[in-house]
Amino acid sequence: MIDDELWSAIGDPTRRRMLDLLLASGGGTATSLSDQLPVTRQAVAKHLGVLDRAGLVHSTPSGRERRYTVDEDRLAHAINQLTDVTSAWDRRLQRIARIAEAIEKHERKLP
Amino acid sequence: MIDDELWSAIGDPTRRRMLDLLLASGGGTATSLSDQLPVTRQAVAKHLGVLDRAGLVHSTPSGRERRYTVDEDRLAHAINQLTDVTSAWDRRLQRIARIAEAIEKHERKLP
DNA sequence: GTCACATGCAACCAAAGGTTGCGAAAGGAC
DNA sequence: GTCCTTTCGCAACCTTTGGTTGCATGTGAC
């Protein structure tokens, strides 16, 4: 089964963009992230708190700033779960498509 | 780019379960869904409204009940977008893994 | 006609994403 | 050292959203 905290952590579009930015630049602070996002530093800080509780990022204080980096193993885990969900739906859709096709073929025989 | 309404529609865990139930039984009503879910009929009705606005389900009134079915093409589209996001992250993680490996190899040469 | 059941609508509540405002700690300029 | 800037953390507040209860309406079964 899927870990709901993980999913809800990456379910938010702002958090997805944050993870993207952190991956692209190899880490960052609440302030540096908010520069590249359409929300305030405080909103970013709250999201970082969510990501931290989900284990997707880790933070280390360094002087007057606090640097966040992505936990790549954990993110890979989350991505695997996402893939599982999508492939499960894919299989179900394909099964339905096959059934629909069979019904159609069946009905063509008896007008 | 990703359609945010689509993503947010399938981003909610209850709505995901609803789509699953609708696919499994080939359609259903707000009442029949709420029987199989831990929420009230009215909550289900609201979710069905969201899914309907996102184009993921369609409804047809039939007598005193209103029957909902999944728009499979649209859901397939949403799943494709999900797949795109996950594979984009996958590629990025792999690139980072390669870089990290290269750095490690480089540092082993100069103690 | 009456009774049961499914729906739709409204009011209300709690959590989450977002904002502004302020006080405190670290670093650099002088 | 003092001053100024920057970064952070905390609190109060607003809005949206997922959820509830309550009630009125419409439709099928008897």
Image: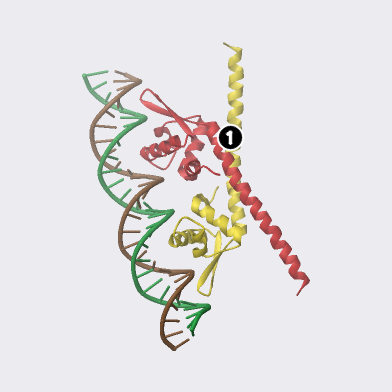
Chain colours: A yellow, B red, C green, D brown
Tell me: residue B105, above or below residue B82.
below
* Closer-to-camera residue (B48/B88): B88
Residue at the image point whose x is 61% and y is 27% from the top: A98
Specify the amino acid type for callout 1. Answer: Arg
Tell me: residue B15, above or below residue A65.
above
Residue at the image point whose x is 75% and y is 66% from the top: B105
Residue at the image point whose x is 53% and y is 52% from the top: A16
How many residues crowd mark 1 within 10 Å: few (<14), some (14–19), many (20+)? Answer: some
Element at label 1: helix
Give the percent coordinates (x, y) of residue D13: 30, 59
Residue with the mark numbered 1: A92
Tell me: residue B57, above or below residue A79.
above
Q: Is residue C24 left or right of residue A67?
A: left
Residue C24 sits in which quadrant?
A: bottom left
Q: The disc numbered 1 marks a residue on which chain?
A: A
Residue A43, can we see it?
A: yes
Q: How many marks?
A: 1
